[in-house]
Image (cartoon, rainbow, N blue to C red):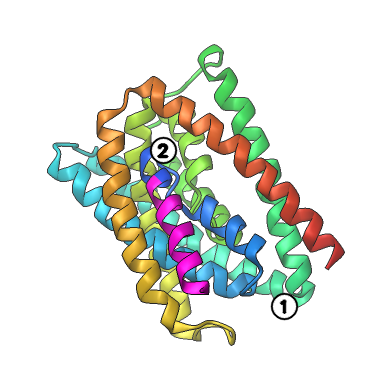
């Protein structure tokens, strides 16, 4: 039963994530927290595996469809995100050891809620704000470090924050930002999965759910990419805003549950 529920969550999350460039982790993490079957560390692993698989197939599909990256830009931001992913994993482990299971979920939910609220406010006002066209390799890498650290610490893949910063700092259109966001998420999850491979999976992690999670993520990535290619920038933006509002409600519920645990 748990595997079936996880499959539904991952399929829906990765489909939506591929459409809006969110990666899916920002949906998977709070929903699996809400279900309460596994602890924060195990949920982080399931989310990382699903997001990694989804990003892989989605990026491949975008390349086959003719999308072309700015090589220097994607290398710089991805290298930074890998370093940031290592930092985020270290910070998460330190916080989990000192705070305990209930508190770390509350901290993650609270930070996610604040992040989503800020991103939603920015997205609604984006057309009235100044934008930049950042291309300096060191500055781009620094942005990647920040995105990778936040995404891995929160266990969300980082998609919403990626989209906001990519449109603000790099002057990307919404659909273009979604593809660069997925590339950044992909590389940050490599660091997360490498750390898990070295340290071992959490005690409550169950491998029988893993094939289901991966299969659902692959299907979601392919379906979501096809939808993204067919949608306009305006349609992707509207979907993104609705999704952020829904996730804010879930984060508020998880924060309350974590504080009362």
Asked which secondary structure carries label 1, the reply is helix
Q: Main secondary structure of the magenta part?
A: helix
174 in the magenta segment: no
x and y percent of residue 10 in the render? Answer: 44, 59
Callout 2: few (<14), some (14-19), or many (20+) C-alpha neighbours within 10 Å?
many
Asked which secondary structure carries label 2, the reply is helix
Residue range (magenta): 1-15
Q: In the shown orientation, is residue 236 left or right of residue 94?
A: left
Q: Quadrant of residue 42?
A: bottom right
What residue is shown with label 2? 20
- When the figure is inspected, residue 102 is found, relative to residue 159, above or below; the finding is below
Residue under the point 67% across and 35% down = 117
* Quadrant housing the C terminus: bottom right
What residue is shown with label 1? 97
Instruction: Return the disc, 1 or 2, that comes first in the chain's sequence.
Output: 2
Can the viewer see residue 137 in this picture? no
């Amino acid at each position: 039963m748990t595997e079936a529920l996880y499959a539904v969550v991952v399929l829906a999350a990765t489909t939506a994530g591929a459409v809006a460039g969110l990666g899916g982790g920002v949906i998977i993490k709070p929903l699996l927290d809400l279900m309460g079957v596994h602890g924060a560390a195990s949920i982080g692993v399931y989310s990382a595996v699903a997001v990694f698989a989804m990003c892989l197939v989605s990026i491949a599909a975008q390349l086959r469809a003719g999308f072309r990256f700015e090589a220097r830009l994607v290398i710089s931001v991805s290298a930074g995100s890998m370093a940031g992913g290592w930092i985020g994993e270290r910070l998460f482990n330190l916080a989990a050891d000192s705070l305990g299971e209930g508190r770390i979920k509350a901290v993650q939910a609270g930070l996610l809620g604040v992040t989503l609220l800020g991103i939603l406010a920015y997205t609604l006002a984006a057309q009235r704000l100044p934008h930049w066209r950042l291309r300096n390799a060191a500055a781009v890498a620094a942005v990647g470090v920040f995105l990778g650290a936040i995404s891995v610490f929160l266990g969300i893949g980082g998609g919403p924050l990626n989209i906001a910063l990519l449109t603000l700092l790099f002057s990307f259109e919404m659909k273009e930002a979604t593809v660069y966001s997925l590339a950044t998420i992909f590389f940050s999850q490599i660091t997360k999965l490498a750390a898990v491979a070295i340290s071992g999976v959490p005690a409550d992690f169950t491998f029988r759910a893993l094939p289901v999670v991966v299969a659902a993520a692959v299907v979601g990535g392919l379906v979501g990419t096809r939808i993204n290619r067919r949608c306009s920038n305006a349609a992707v933006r509207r979907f993104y805003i609705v999704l952020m509002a829904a996730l804010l409600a879930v984060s508020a519920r998880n924060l309350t549950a974590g504080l009362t645990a």
